[in-house]
Image (tube, rainbow, N blue to C red):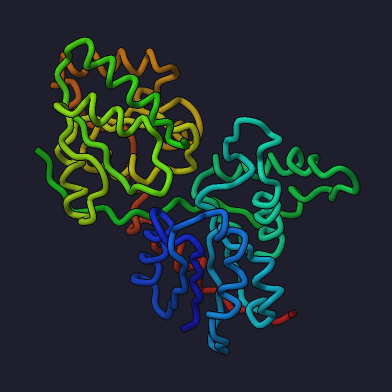
Amino acid sequence: MSILLIEAFYGGSHKQLADLLQEEIEECVLYTLPAKKWHWRARTAALYFMQTVPANANYRILFASSVLNLTELIALRPDLGKLKKVLYFHENQLAYPVQKCQERDFQYGYNQILSCLVADIVVFNSAFNMESFLTSIGKFLKLIPDHRPKDLEKIIRPKCQVLHFPIRFPDVSREHDKDPESFFKVLLKLKEMDLPFHMSVLGETFTDVPDIFSEAKKALESSVLHWGYLPSKDDYFQALCMADVVISTAKHEFFGVAMIEAVYCGCYPLCPNALVYPEIFPAEYLYSTPEQLLKRLQNFCKRPDIVRKHLYKGEMDQFSWAALRGKFRSLLSTEPREDL
């Protein structure tokens, strides 16, 4: 049990990574909290793990996602402070969109900055995620009315690196924050034009579901193949293999596991020319406006052979666990610090 994995929000891509590391890397032990009430996890998870993680002299490395307030945990559990502490950012709160700056809860971003200062290595799943966080630190700290800390970006940056989220691709053969309003508006326009298409809306449903989902499900009912969460990973990948196009209308995205999985299964991606997408996908798969997206989909509805015969021009293997295994093993193999 030399590697201690802590995941304060055990769901989605957070769960996917934690499970993968536990299964593929020897001597890992995992402690988690369910993926519910994110804000409360960020506020209180450290206190929970202080009580539930037993002391163990064999621990060498602590790996946690940035939902955890690492600073609080280390203060509450000095024994864990001696470990090599790796903090992994699936997303960051400094670049997370809010309607008005005044509405941003200062505490969440502040906690992530503190956690970076305590961590030995800070890992981001994309360059976009890393740079959007680091370059926002100075502006974010200006929200403090006086006696502001200085040069924190310079302190944190040397600890930082990009290590893409590793995806265990399937063996397949082929025959608010994600902006569902924009997605469904485009599909409803296709429906009004009487263009033929079928759609699947896949994914977990959490506590608050925008009204547009129920409205769109009813309006697009005749075109729906799948709607909602598919508990079986095999069924999920089978649904992706049946599709021709995968669409993102995200207003924030720091990596995009689902989009990459869909492309691996043979889908033609259409993504905003923003956020992390230009880092992941070649330019021909990006659109700048909803009108451009609608025009591309109109063309595909009329000429489905365009996408069915298309060979993806990007590189997917670089995101596979097979390609990234060695880097993660190296990340989780350093001895503990002796100077504490």
**Image check: 195 left or right of 37?**
left
Task: Residue 209 in the image: state x and y as whole percent.
Answer: 39, 40
Can the viewer see residue 214? Answer: yes
Q: Quadrant of residue 306?
A: top left
x 67%, y 73%: residue: 74
Q: Farthest residue in the top direction?
A: 193
Instruction: Out of 116 and 9, give the one closest to the viewer.
Output: 9
Q: Is residue 66 left or right of residue 74?
A: left
Q: Which residue is located at x 55 percent, y 60 percent?
A: 41
Q: Is residue 270 left or right of residue 251?
A: left
Q: Position of residue 3 (x, y in %)?
A: 49, 77
Q: Closer to the camera, 334 or 24?
A: 24
- The answer to whether residue 309 of the structure is visible from this angle is no
Residue appearing at x 39%, y 49% in the figure? 206
Residue under the point 57% across and 40% down? 96
Q: Of all residues shown, which one is farthest toward the bottom?
A: 57
Quarter of the picture holding the C terminus: bottom right
When asked about the image quadrant of residue 247, the answer is top left
**Whole-percent x and y of residue 62?**
56, 72
Q: Is residue 223 left or right of residue 100?
A: left
- The correct choice, above or below, for 19 with respect to 205 in the image is below
